[in-house]
Amino acid sequence: MKTLAFLSQKGGSGKTTLAVHTAVAVHESGERVAIVDTDIQKSATIWGNARHEDAPIIATAAAADLAEVLKAARQDNMTFVIVDTAPHAAPDAARIAKAVDLVAIPCRPTAFDLAAVGSAVEIVKAAKARGVFVLSACPFRSPEIAEARAMLADYGLPLAPVEITDRRAFARAVATGRAVTEFDSAGMSPSDVN
Ligand SMILES: Nc1ncnc2c1ncn2[C@@H]1O[C@H](COP(=O)(O)OP(=O)(O)OP(=O)(O)O)[C@@H](O)[C@H]1O
Ligand SMILES: [Mg+2]
């Protein structure tokens, strides 16, 4: 069973958006997927409640119970677990980083997000976890993307080669319990795709 957490101390960096979209993509590729929502804001859980599909399964759990939840997921033959996390630091974030195979750190290409990324990197390194940056909500083809890539390179963690573009469709999808890949393409309006 593979385990992946989206973690950053910066509120609104895109953790939940990426968590639910990754979960749907991984489900579509044939895995048995569960999302563990450890954030008391319960955004991923709310997304799951708005959803008409059974998959992915959503478990709402305190970070302190993550090990137990992962054990239960393994017993239920889940093959992929995605952990959504709250935008604040230790001890929960450290516990989560230690429990998963990979920590993805979403970061918008803005000065505030880039300034905040160091605390997530420290948590990943202290936990001796594998970490990767993902640039999220990037303005289409903007120069800030290359600047952000250059700044993130200094932290010594790999950076996902593709960035996630800022598109209204992501917000619309999440608000309606879907992923952007689940929109009916024939019924998509230009405003859905920006
Ligand atoms: N790629 C994107 N394009 C457009 N909007 C986005 C994108 N990614 C995130 N958003 C929007 O940005 C806001 C914050 O995203 P999200 O809730 O995923 O962040 P978060 O890191 O989970 O926040 P929190 O720290 O509060 O849990 C939401 O309104 C979401 O719809
Ligand atoms: Mg969130």
Image: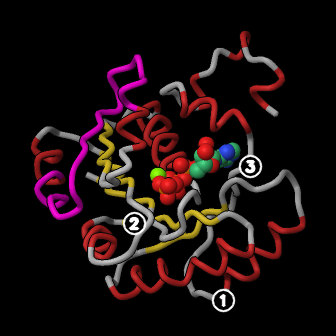
Name the residue type under label 1: Asp
Does residue 145 appear in the picture of this structure?
Answer: yes
- Residue 165 has which mark? 3
Which residue is pictured at 41% across the width and 75% down the height?
130
- Local crowd at mark 3 within 10 Å, few (<14), some, or many (≥20)? some
Picture colour scheme: secondary structure
Name the residue type under label 2: Leu
- The residue closer to the viewer here, 27 or 95, is 95
- Local crowd at mark 1 within 10 Å, few (<14), some, or many (≥20)? few
* Mark 3 in CB contact with mark 1 (< 8 angstroms): no
Instruction: Report the side of 194 relative to 155 (left or right).
Output: right
Which corner quadrant of the image does residue 43 belong to? top left
Q: Tell me: is circle 1 under 8 Å from ligand 1.
A: no
Does residue 15 appear in the picture of this structure?
Answer: no
Q: CA distance from mark 3 to mark 2?
A: 22 Å
Q: Tell me: is circle 3 under 8 Å from ligand 1.
A: yes
* Mark 3 in CB contact with mark 2 (< 8 angstroms): no
Picture layout, residue 187 above or below residue 175? above
Which residue is pictured at 39% across the width and 53% down the height?
84
Q: Counting residues from the N terminus, which is met first, the one under dot 3 or under dot 2?
A: 2
Tag 3 secondary structure: loop
Which residue is pictured at 66% across the width and 57% down the height?
136
Image: magenta residue range: 48-69
Picture layout, residue 123 above or below residue 1? below
The residue at which mark 2 appears reads as 102
Q: Position of residue 116 (x, y in %)?
A: 58, 78
Q: Counting residues from the N terminus, which is met first, the one under dot 3 or under dot 1?
A: 1
Q: Counting residues from the N terminus, which is met first, the one under dot 1 or under dot 2?
A: 2
